[in-house]
Protein backbone atom coordinates (compact mmCIF):
# COMPACT_ATOMS: atom_id res chain seq x y z
CA UNK A 1 0.00 0.00 0.00
CA UNK A 2 2.83 2.37 0.80
CA UNK A 3 4.49 1.80 -2.60
CA UNK A 4 1.25 2.41 -4.46
CA UNK A 5 0.67 5.63 -2.50
CA UNK A 6 4.20 6.90 -3.27
CA UNK A 7 3.80 6.02 -6.95
CA UNK A 8 0.47 7.88 -7.16
CA UNK A 9 1.88 10.87 -5.28
CA UNK A 10 4.98 11.01 -7.50
CA UNK A 11 2.88 10.77 -10.67
CA UNK A 12 0.51 13.49 -9.44
CA UNK A 13 3.33 15.86 -8.48
CA UNK A 14 5.09 15.23 -11.81
CA UNK A 15 1.89 15.98 -13.71
CA UNK A 16 1.35 19.20 -11.73
CA UNK A 17 4.93 20.33 -12.40
CA UNK A 18 4.50 19.60 -16.12
CA UNK A 19 1.24 21.56 -16.28
CA UNK A 20 2.79 24.45 -14.34
CA UNK A 21 5.85 24.54 -16.57
CA UNK A 22 3.72 24.53 -19.72
CA UNK A 23 1.54 27.35 -18.39
CA UNK A 24 4.58 29.38 -17.35
CA UNK A 25 6.15 28.88 -20.77
CA UNK A 26 3.01 30.16 -22.51
CA UNK A 27 2.78 33.11 -20.14
CA UNK A 28 6.45 34.03 -20.63
CA UNK A 29 6.11 33.93 -24.42
CA UNK A 30 3.25 36.46 -24.20
CA UNK A 31 5.03 38.68 -21.62
CA UNK A 32 7.11 40.82 -24.05
CA UNK A 33 4.01 41.63 -26.10
CA UNK A 34 2.18 42.80 -23.00
CA UNK A 35 5.10 45.09 -22.10
CA UNK A 36 5.08 46.92 -25.44
CA UNK A 37 1.60 48.37 -24.87
CA UNK A 38 2.83 50.21 -21.79
CA UNK A 39 5.90 51.39 -23.70
CA UNK A 40 3.76 52.66 -26.58
CA UNK A 41 1.56 54.60 -24.13
CA UNK A 42 4.67 56.12 -22.50
CA UNK A 43 6.08 57.14 -25.89
CA UNK A 44 2.77 58.74 -26.89
CA UNK A 45 2.66 60.66 -23.59
CA UNK A 46 6.26 61.82 -24.08
CA UNK A 47 5.42 63.11 -27.58
CA UNK A 48 2.40 65.00 -26.24
CA UNK A 49 4.55 66.60 -23.51
CA UNK A 50 7.27 67.65 -25.94
CA UNK A 51 4.66 69.41 -28.09
CA UNK A 52 3.60 71.69 -25.20
CA UNK A 53 5.03 75.24 -25.22
CA UNK A 54 7.72 75.88 -22.62
CA UNK A 55 7.76 78.74 -20.11
CA UNK A 56 9.80 81.77 -21.25
CA UNK A 57 13.29 82.24 -19.83
CA UNK A 58 14.18 85.28 -17.73
CA UNK A 59 17.55 86.55 -18.93
CA UNK A 60 18.37 87.63 -22.49
CA UNK A 61 21.39 85.31 -22.65
CA UNK A 62 19.21 82.36 -21.73
CA UNK A 63 16.60 83.56 -24.21
CA UNK A 64 19.15 83.68 -27.04
CA UNK A 65 20.47 80.24 -26.17
CA UNK A 66 16.95 78.83 -26.06
CA UNK A 67 16.09 80.34 -29.45
CA UNK A 68 19.33 79.01 -30.96
CA UNK A 69 18.73 75.60 -29.41
CA UNK A 70 15.14 75.58 -30.69
CA UNK A 71 16.30 76.42 -34.22
CA UNK A 72 18.89 73.64 -34.18
CA UNK A 73 16.41 71.12 -32.74
CA UNK A 74 13.71 72.06 -35.25
CA UNK A 75 16.11 71.39 -38.11
CA UNK A 76 17.02 67.93 -36.77
CA UNK A 77 13.75 66.85 -35.14
CA UNK A 78 11.17 64.89 -37.07
CA UNK A 79 7.53 65.97 -36.79
CA UNK A 80 5.47 64.58 -33.92
CA UNK A 81 3.88 61.32 -34.99
CA UNK A 82 0.13 61.06 -35.47
CA UNK A 83 -1.75 59.05 -32.86
CA UNK A 84 -1.86 55.30 -33.52
CA UNK A 85 -5.36 53.80 -33.75
CA UNK A 86 -4.28 50.21 -34.47
CA UNK A 87 -0.89 49.28 -33.05
CA UNK A 88 -0.18 45.54 -32.82
CA UNK A 89 2.85 44.74 -30.69
CA UNK A 90 5.84 43.29 -32.49
CA UNK A 91 6.66 39.64 -31.88
CA UNK A 92 9.75 39.23 -29.72
CA UNK A 93 12.09 36.95 -31.74
CA UNK A 94 12.52 33.73 -29.73
CA UNK A 95 16.30 33.61 -30.14
CA UNK A 96 16.64 37.18 -28.87
CA UNK A 97 14.25 36.39 -26.01
CA UNK A 98 16.20 33.29 -24.99
CA UNK A 99 19.50 35.16 -25.08
CA UNK A 100 18.07 38.15 -23.21
CA UNK A 101 18.77 40.61 -26.03
CA UNK A 102 16.77 43.81 -26.22
CA UNK A 103 17.05 47.34 -27.47
CA UNK A 104 15.30 50.23 -29.14
CA UNK A 105 14.76 50.42 -32.89
CA UNK A 106 13.93 53.84 -34.31
CA UNK A 107 11.79 53.46 -37.41
CA UNK A 108 11.24 56.15 -40.04
CA UNK A 109 7.55 55.78 -40.89
CA UNK A 110 5.73 57.35 -43.83
CA UNK A 111 1.97 57.71 -43.51
CA UNK A 112 -0.45 58.75 -46.25
CA UNK A 113 -3.23 61.32 -45.81
CA UNK A 114 -5.67 58.75 -44.39
CA UNK A 115 -3.27 57.31 -41.78
CA UNK A 116 -2.12 54.17 -43.59
CA UNK A 117 1.56 53.25 -43.35
CA UNK A 118 3.15 53.50 -46.80
CA UNK A 119 6.83 52.93 -45.99
CA UNK A 120 8.94 51.79 -43.02
CA UNK A 121 12.72 51.86 -42.79
CA UNK A 122 15.15 51.59 -39.90
CA UNK A 123 16.44 55.06 -38.97
CA UNK A 124 18.55 53.76 -36.06
CA UNK A 125 19.16 50.06 -35.49
CA UNK A 126 18.94 48.29 -32.14
CA UNK A 127 22.06 46.39 -33.13
CA UNK A 128 20.07 43.16 -33.55
CA UNK A 129 18.76 42.46 -37.08
CA UNK A 130 16.03 40.14 -35.74
CA UNK A 131 14.60 42.89 -33.50
CA UNK A 132 14.84 45.45 -36.31
CA UNK A 133 13.00 43.12 -38.71
CA UNK A 134 10.26 42.30 -36.20
CA UNK A 135 9.65 46.00 -35.47
CA UNK A 136 9.56 46.82 -39.19
CA UNK A 137 7.06 44.02 -39.93
CA UNK A 138 4.82 45.07 -37.06
CA UNK A 139 4.87 48.77 -38.02
CA UNK A 140 3.62 47.93 -41.53
CA UNK A 141 0.38 46.73 -39.89
CA UNK A 142 -0.15 49.90 -37.82
CA UNK A 143 -2.80 52.50 -38.65
CA UNK A 144 -2.70 56.12 -37.49
CA UNK A 145 -5.19 58.95 -37.17
CA UNK A 146 -5.20 60.97 -40.36
CA UNK A 147 -2.48 63.64 -40.20
CA UNK A 148 -3.52 67.28 -39.82
CA UNK A 149 -4.70 68.64 -43.14
CA UNK A 150 -4.74 65.14 -44.65
CA UNK A 151 -1.15 65.60 -45.84
CA UNK A 152 1.22 62.61 -46.01
CA UNK A 153 3.88 62.77 -43.31
CA UNK A 154 7.09 61.03 -42.31
CA UNK A 155 8.28 60.73 -38.72
CA UNK A 156 10.58 58.70 -36.48
CA UNK A 157 8.98 56.24 -34.06
CA UNK A 158 10.91 54.28 -31.39
CA UNK A 159 10.02 50.64 -30.69
CA UNK A 160 11.56 49.17 -27.54
CA UNK A 161 12.20 45.49 -26.93
CA UNK A 162 12.70 44.90 -23.22
CA UNK A 163 12.59 41.80 -21.06
CA UNK A 164 11.27 42.46 -17.56
CA UNK A 165 8.84 44.75 -15.81
CA UNK A 166 7.39 47.70 -17.75
CA UNK A 167 8.46 51.11 -16.53
CA UNK A 168 7.79 54.51 -18.04
CA UNK A 169 10.88 55.92 -19.72
Image: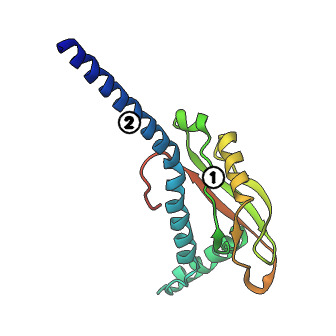
Judged from the image, the secondary structure of the residue bearing numbered disc 1 is loop
Q: Is residue 78 visible?
A: no
Image side of residue 163 versus residue 78, left or right = left
In terms of image quadrants, where is residue 66?
A: bottom right
Q: Position of residue 30 (x, y in %)?
A: 52, 47
Q: Considering only vertical position in the picture, is 60 above or below 95? A: below
Query: Dot 2, how many residues are within 10 Å of its Cα: few (below 14), some (14-19), or many (20+)?
Result: few
Q: Position of residue 108 (x, y in %)?
A: 74, 60
Q: Are marks 2 and 1 in contact (CB under 8 Å)?
A: no
Q: Considering only vertical position in the picture, is 96 above or below 40? A: above
Residue at 22% across / 12% down in the picture? 3
Q: Considering only vertical position in the picture, is 2 above or below 20? A: above
Residue on which the image places disc 1: 90
Given this view, does label 2 or label 1 mark the residue nearer the observer?
2
Query: Dot 1, how many residues are within 10 Å of its Cα: few (below 14), some (14-19), or many (20+)?
Result: many
Q: Considering only vertical position in the picture, is 85 above or below 56? A: above
Q: Real-space Cα distance between discs 2 and 1? A: 26 Å
Residue at 49% across / 62% down in the picture? 38
Image side of residue 80 versus residue 154, left or right = left
Residue at 53% across / 61% down in the picture? 37
Judged from the image, the secondary structure of the residue bearing numbered disc 2 is helix
The one nearer the camera, 12 or 140, is: 12
Image side of residue 81 versus residue 58, left or right = right
Q: Work out whether mark 2 precedes mark 1 in sequence or the reverse, and give the earlier one.
A: 2
Which residue sits furthest left?
2
Residue on which the image places disc 2: 20
Residue at 27% across / 17% down in the picture? 7
Image side of residue 64 versus residue 42, left or right = right
The one nearer the camera, 123 or 25, is: 25
Amino acid sequence: MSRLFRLRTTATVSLLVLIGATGMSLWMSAWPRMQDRATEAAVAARHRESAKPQAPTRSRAHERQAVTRARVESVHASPAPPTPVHAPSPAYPMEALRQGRGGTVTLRVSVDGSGNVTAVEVAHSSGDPALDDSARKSMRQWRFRAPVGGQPTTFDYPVTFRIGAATAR
